[in-house]
Amino acid sequence: MPIYYLLPVASLLRDRAWSASAHQGPCCVCAPSEALARRFAGQAFWVPAAAAFGAAAPWPAATPTSPWSQRRLVKARELATPEDVEPPPLGRIFVPADPDRPDDVFVALGRT
């Protein structure tokens, strides 16, 4: 099973779509395709519209689409995985253990 490395474009982190994501850093996702990896990330980090815009937002407000699904906002590449290593389960997401060191150790989302 491939693992995809998803990297937000730093210069576009102020884009309105990021208000719909609880995570704005890199992540790795175990998925058979880039499209599915983006979908898993979008679902895992989704922030409901009411929380993203606050109670003072005019309703009905347009709900932003997940930034993880947008190629202009998030770059993706498939990582090489050794054949002798058991792949993580489908949909497993890994995030940096230390947000201040995004290129260091990654841990499974929801596990410390």
Image (cartoon, rainbow, N blue to C red):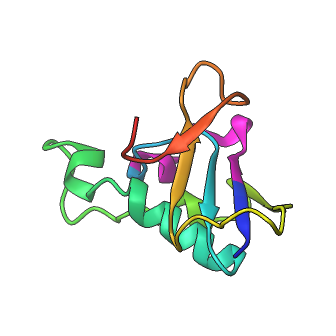
Q: Which residues are magenta?
A: 6-19
Does 67 appear above or below 1? above
Is residue 15 inside the magenta stretch?
A: yes
Query: Of 53 and 24, which appears nearest the observer?
Result: 24
- The quadrant in which the C terminus is found is top left
Question: Percent from the top left, x then y, of residue 36?
Answer: 59, 78
Horizontally, is 33 left or right of 20 in the view? right
Query: Is residue 109 in sight in this rendering?
Result: yes
- The quadrant in which the N terminus is found is bottom right
Question: Percent from the top left, x then y, of residue 79?
Answer: 82, 59
Query: Is residue 24 in sight in this rendering?
Result: no
Give me the residue at 67% from left, 81% from top.
32
Give me the residue at 47% from left, 42% from top.
23
Q: Quadrant of residue 69?
A: bottom right
Query: Of 92 and 47, which appears nearest the observer?
Result: 92
Give me the residue at 84% from left, 62% from top.
82
Image label count: 0
Is residue 32 inside the magenta stretch?
A: no
Give me the residue at 86% from left, 61% from top.
80
Farthest front residue?
84
Question: Percent from the top left, x then y, of residue 104?
Answer: 70, 27
